Image: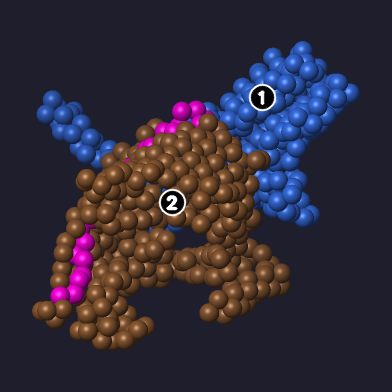
Chain colours: A brown, B blue
Amino acid sequence: MRASSLLAGATALCAVLALATSTRAGVVNPNISLIGQPVLRWTDAPGDPARERFVLDAGETELMLDSYLNPYAYGTAVLSFSDGAVDVEEAFFQILRGLPAGLGIKGGKYRVGFGKLNPAHPHTYPFADRPHVLAAYLPGSDSFDDTGLQVSEQLALPHDVALTASADWLQGDSFRVPRASTGLANDPLVTAGAGRDGDRALEPRPAGLARLSAFVPIGDRSGLELGSSYPQGTNNVAAATRTSVLGGDAKLKYWTSANAYVLVQAEALALDREQAGWDGAAAAYTRTTVRPSGGYAFVDMNFNPRYDAGASFERFQDPAAGGANASAVGAFAGLALMEETTSFRLGWERYLPAHAAGVPAPDAVNTVTVRVLWSMGPHKAHQF
Amino acid sequence: MSRRAFPAALALAALLLPAAALAKVRVAASTTDLASIANSVGGEQVEVFSIAKPNADPHRIEALPSYMVKVSRAQVFLEVGLQLDQWADAIIDGSRNDKVLKVDCSQGVNVLEKPAKVDASMGDVHPNGNPHYWLDPRNGAIAARNIAEGLARVDPAHAAEFRARAEAFGKDCDAAYERGKAVAAKLPGRAIFTYHRSWPYFADAFGLEVVDTVEPVPGIPPTARHLSDLVQVAKARKVALLLQEPYFSQDGGQFLARQAGVRVVTASSACDADAAGSYLAHFDALFRLLEGGATR
């Protein structure tokens, strides 16, 4: 599997490079960007085999190809190389113009537009890892991504306020939550046999996402965006249990001088997840519902295009710990060596895991990361 | 006109006024310079706004949704071209406007500094040549003609007026060029430094020599060694002046001022406002600064 993935990735890379050298760049070739992010990490997490040791990791390397397909459509593909495996992280088309009433369409596999952080690639985050609350609440493992079709509409309101509404029809595979087998003889996970799809996780069940956001300009360059997202999908097909998340997000970017700005961003999430179980006596699935909530916020001071520093905070009810509170604080700083194609990001986080009432609090987990971001390829327009 | 007829006519005029405003060609411009030229060429028939303001680096404009909203209503988008305003495509795409006419204002310009080979070791070099052409007023005249043709395609009824105004504007540009040359000829020193390679058209037009730039290569901040080399160059070549935009770091300039007595003149390479006249007034303002700044 790993060898075939590597072969597929190497073949794709060779094809891209061959195309790039045999034809005129910028005419028929797509834009090609490669982003590497090796990381040095230290953690005192109990049970971590690398506890209190520095570990150097190649991290995830991203190869991005994008180009206009024709005057109306744009295509984007992002392949990620990590731990010897190749993954198609995103591959989607967008119809940019020509549709009635200013509609836009996006289709394929993509990072789902929940909030402000999930749609962005992690190398654009000012800190090392995505907030724990997103990992705990959103579908998917490393990110909330899925295959789907999005229809969006952008409305112009007075004072150049941009209101964007979008609806996604998703394949829904990212919503699946594996159920632990009870070991009972009539548990479908047991009766189906090892390695078989006892809970019918491979059956498709469509999911959806609705999002509404408004961008309010402040002066010439600053702005505030407020948004709300609501995905819903099936986490266990056989038990017909569902997951939904209501999210609210705010992002303020305020330029304090020609080269400096402050970025304040926050998201609040409320998870509503039915968890499937198995009742051997009744020979039926059971459902329990968890409704935890939480959120994160961070402030990032960009002193100039080369230096930034900030702090983050998050607090959430951990569904894996009976809804007890977990929290984390962090600090981070970035330095671009010359300009944005080579930068260093230093981060520290202190995570206090959730623990049930009456149980001694576990030790806080400290993690320090030094990440190097290097990129080659064309400079892209920065999006808000 | 009777006493009753006058208020009625006034009310009718008030009703018709918004319709007249709607009839204007809505123009989006990447920079204030192109917006100002468009106002000169379009006159009363256009409504123009610019995206990059003079206090912001035109290479690094963020594609804000509010810009997309504005461009969604535009009929013409004026690009600097030569890959300076690559962000414009993201804004136009985000606007979902399939009717907007893109006008590359660099068409017909005699492009300077076209590299034979480009790679990232050379810094942020523009592969099609230096894009800061508007800093030669003769290129302002070329941009005006491009703008006139673009406006004529969208509003053919006023095509003759657009072309006539572009011609008149061209003469104003020629006058600004002659004025600038006369002032530049009196400057005590012609050798200058610039921070970024933004001023070769300006120097070429007015007989100045850009001896070196504070950036060792475009987009890369200066190293201590490069600044030290510039001190030697300034002394050897009698470079009296550094011309740099306000959005670049002042540190290098301050070092050169201390070590080599170079006078730092901070001026945007873009004009102040979208209004007609602002583009040409910018040259006069630049020369006033140079006259004051070229003496040690």
Using the rendered image of the protein, determine whether residue A157 is visible from the camera's viewpoint: yes
- The quarter in which the C terminus of chain A is drawn is top left
Residue at coordinates 37% horizontally, 83% vertically from top-left?
A195
Camera-side residue of B54 and A305: A305
Which residue is denoted by mark 1 in the rendering? B251
Residue at coordinates 37% horizontally, 34% vertically from top-left?
A218
Camera-side residue of B285 and B69: B69
Q: Which mark is residue A46?
A: 2
Q: Amino acid at mark 1?
A: Asp
| Residue B215 inside the magenta-drawn segment | no
Check chain identity for marks 2 and 1: say if they share one: no
Q: Mark 2 falls within which chain? A: A
Considering only vertical position in the picture, is A153 above or below B195? Answer: below
Camera-side residue of A233 and A311: A311
Considering only vertical position in the picture, is A171 above or below A56? Answer: below
Q: Amino acid at mark 2?
A: Pro
Residue at coordinates 53% horizontally, 47% vertically from top-left?
A52
Query: Majority secondary structure of the magenta segment?
Result: strand
Q: Quadrant of residue A189?
A: bottom left
Residue at coordinates 41% horizontally, 71% vertically from top-left?
A108
Q: Quadrant of residue B166?
A: top right
> At which x and y percent is residue A9?
59, 73
> At which x and y percent is residue A331?
46, 37
Considering only vertical position in the picture, is A96 above or below A309? Answer: below
Using the rendered image of the protein, determine whether residue B39 is visible from the camera's viewpoint: no
Q: Nearer the viewer, mark 2 or mark 1?
A: 2
Count neighbours of disc 1 (C-alpha within 10 A) and say few if under 14, some if 14 to 19, many if 20 or more.
Answer: few
* Helix, strand or loop at mark 2: loop
> At which x and y percent is residue A235?
26, 69
Q: Quadrant of residue B98?
A: bottom left
Instruction: Report the residue that reaches farthest toward the top.
Output: B296
> At which x and y percent is residue B180?
70, 26
